[in-house]
Image: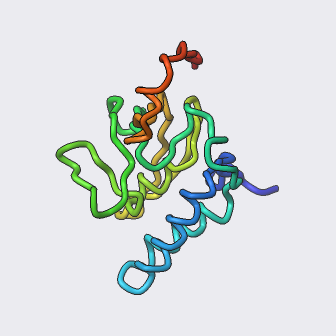
Amino acid sequence: MQDNTKTRRKPNIRISQSDHARLSALASTVAVRNPEASDELLAELERARIVADGSVSADTVQMGSSVTFKPDTGDAKTVTLVFPGDADISAGKVSILTPIGTALIGLPAGQSIMWTARDGRRHELLVLAVNQPAPEGDGADRLAPASPTITASV
C-alpha cells in the first residue's frame, strides 16, 4: 500500500483568462534565467481551471489580491500578490515568481496548500481572507451609485 501522507493532492485552483495569459508569458520570459520559478509557475497554470475574466470569485487569490494566510511556521501574514517588477517584501508585496506567490495563485479563502520553499523544506499555508484591489480608472464610481457589498463567511 502507498503512503499518501507525503504526496497530498494539490487543491483545485481557478485563474482568469487574462491572468493566465500574462502569467504564461511571464513564465516563458524568465525560463532561461530562472528555470525553477518558471517551471513551478507553469505547473500551477497547467492544473488551473481557466475561467472568463470577471468569473473568478472575489474570495479567490488573483494578481493584485491582498491575501491573509496562516503559514505552518507562525502567525498570520497579509501580502499582496504582484508581478516581479512591483515586488517589495518590506511593503508586503510578494512576487508571483516566489514559491509562496506561486502557491497562493488561484486559491480561495479557506483552502490550504503544501508548497516547497527555496531551501527544499515543505510547508503548508491556509488562506484566511482575500481582498481584491479597487478597479482603476473605469469611471463606474462616478456613473452609478455604490451597490451593497455581500461578504461570505469562512
Q: Which residue lies at the image location 47% right of the left edge and 31% below the top edge? A: 140
Q: Is residue 78 left or right of residue 128?
A: left
Task: Give the percent coordinates (x, y) of residue 72.
Answer: 42, 38
Quadrant of the image containing the N terminus:
bottom right
Give the total number of marks visible in the rendering: 0
Q: Which residue lies at the image location 41% right of the left edge and 58% below the top edge? A: 96
Q: Depth check: give the residue in front, 109 or 75.
A: 109
Q: Is residue 9 left or right of residue 125?
A: right
Q: Is residue 24 above or below residue 79?
A: below
Q: Is residue 104 above or below residue 83?
A: above
Q: Residue furthest front?
A: 143
Task: Give the percent coordinates (x, y) of residue 28.
Answer: 49, 79
Q: Residue furthest bottom?
A: 32
Quadrant of the image containing the C terminus:
top right
Q: Is residue 55 above or below residue 33?
A: above
Task: Give the percent coordinates (x, y) of residue 129.
Answer: 47, 28
Q: Residue furthest right?
A: 1
Question: Residue 70 appears in which quarter of the rendering?
Answer: top left
Q: Which residue lies at the image location 27% right of the left edge and 57% below the top edge? A: 86
Question: Residue 20 appears in which quarter of the rendering?
Answer: bottom right
Q: Depth check: give the residue in front, 152 or 111.
A: 152
Question: Residue 32 appears in which quarter of the rendering?
Answer: bottom left
Q: Which residue lies at the image location 40% right of the left edge and 78% below the top edge? A: 30
Q: Is residue 24 above or below residue 8?
A: below
Q: Residue furthest top?
A: 148
Task: Give the percent coordinates (x, y) of residue 2.
Answer: 77, 57
